[in-house]
Amino acid sequence: MNNSIASMPTSKQLSQPANALGADAGREQLWVTGVLLAAVVYQAVLCLMNTVGLHTSVAIVGLTEVLIMLACVPLLMRRLLPGLIMIALLAGAYFCIAALASGWLNPKTFRDLIIPLCFFWFGCNIGRPEVIDRALPPIILVVIALGLFELLMLDTYTRYFDIFSYYVSTGNLAPITDYVRDSKLQLNGTRPEGIGRTLLPGLLGNHRVSSVFLEPVSLGNFATIVAAWGFSRDGKKWRESVFFVGSAIVMIILCDSRFALLLLPLMLATRLLLRGSLLNLCVLAPFVAAAMVLLVGATSEHHGDDLMGRLTVSGLSLLEFDTDLLFAFAIPPYFGDMGYAYVIAGFGLPVCLLLWLSLWLQPLPDERSRRFRALASLYMALILGVSGTSLFAFKTSALLWCMLGCMVQNPAPRRTSTATSTSTLSTAPAAPTFLHTRR
């Protein structure tokens, strides 16, 4: 009796695995926050370096993106996702076949595919939305703080962030003498005369804030993603929803994003009206959006730099597609703000359908997860109608796909470093899913 009591572990020994797991969770939280913050602000850091005399090139931008993705590896290696790897192999094989047919290999298609696959995998292995809940507020505060700095002290801001010169250095803009003399912002950093601001023009003038993203379009996209995260939350957590949606509104006002201004009411309507299985209607979003783009292109003659003008140009580009472009078997022309044309001609229609259906065949555990997928799908479907490559911009797409992966809510097992904790693995009881299996 006494021997058996003496052999029992003490309360201190029993607490060691839990303490180790808690410390491991804290380190994971810091790591995830750091990776996502780096993904959001890296362009601003490179712009600062370029402005102070450390020349930046497109190669350095690409290398920085690779380094950020390599920072994901410790979490990626916790669990392999066979379904995700299979999708990557199928898409990669199709790209090689398309390259043989067209005689041209486009490395950007591989880059545009790797980013969502990497960060979706990253998010799946995190598997807990509360990690994003804690990581997002400091990122938002950094974005808004630098945005207010740009708004209130523009001359000082451009002294450290010469955005125009940075984009010239990275090959995204040709130098324009008159423009450089007038402004150091991106070309769309100021609304042209005659168009003006949509939101608070009397107070904020024609300046559109870009913050860490260096261009206001990306700030608007980031705000839309943050709003979707807020709208996806359950009604009982309305305070958190108010913070995320309120922050998104502030950022939308700062950057004067007309796209976000139109999408927010649609997201709100989706949040209020669609529940349960009705959320699955959003799987049709890109098909409905593409059909509308084609209809506008076939019927409209408006070609201005506004919503209708962009839809018209995008629709006209799709109407000119032949079989080779549809299957990415031809060298595509330049598709500036024509998202659907860019994606189909770059990836090929079969790969586009594979990726989209894979997202929607992924079973999600609760209403919040399905709601966020629906809202994110609206964002993706609509942005392709008015913008070319914005959906694949690293500084916003990394966060979006990490969020989607987290919503699977099936975290990878997490082992502690102590021998006593080998029998206590942090696992979430969930069934095998389409894109990954449990280890």
Image (tube, rainbow, N blue to C red):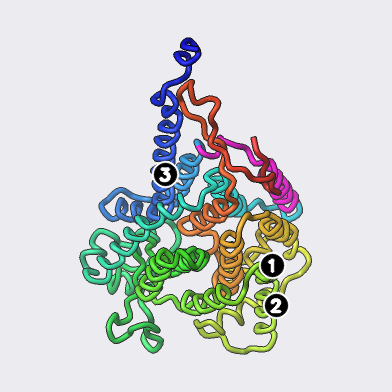
Residue drawn at x 58%, y 59% as measured from the top left: 369
Query: Is 326 placed above or below 418 here?
Result: below
* 116 horizontally vs 147: left or right: right
**Which circle marks residue 277 in the picture?**
1
Label 3 and label 1: CA atoms lie apart by 33 Å
- Residue 176, image x, y percentages: 37, 70
Which kind of residue does numbered mark 1 sit on? Ser
The answer to the question of whether label 2 and label 3 lie on touching residues, with beta carbons closer than 8 A, is: no
Q: Are marks 3 and 1 in contact (CB under 8 Å)?
A: no
* Disc 2/disc 3 C-alpha distance (Å): 42 Å
Is any atom of residue 330 visible in this view? Answer: no
Q: Residues within 10 Å of mark 3 (few under 14, many from 20)?
A: some
Question: Which residue, as the protein is rendered here, is positioned at the far right?
Answer: 323
Of the pair 127 and 203, the residue shown nearer to us: 127
Callout 2 amino acid: Ala
Whether residue 205 appears in magenta in the rendering, the answer is no
In which quadrant of the rendered image does the C terminus lie? top right
How many neighbours does mark 2 have within 10 angstroms: few (below 14), some (14-19), or many (20 or more)?
few
Tag 3 or tag 2, which sits nearer the N-term?
3
Foreground pick, 128 / 43: 128
Tell me the SS state at disc 3.
helix
The foreground one among 5 and 343 is: 5
Q: Earlier in the sequence, mark 1 or mark 2?
A: 1
Which residue is denoted by mark 2 in the rendering? 291
Give the spatial CA distance, label 1 vs label 2.
Answer: 23 Å
Disc sitting over residue 410 in the figure = none
For marks 1 and 2, give the one nearer the viewer: 1
Chain part drawn in magenta:
75-100
Tell me where residue 427 sits by quadrant: top right
Does residue 172 appear in this view?
yes
Vertical side of 87 occupied by 387: above or below? below
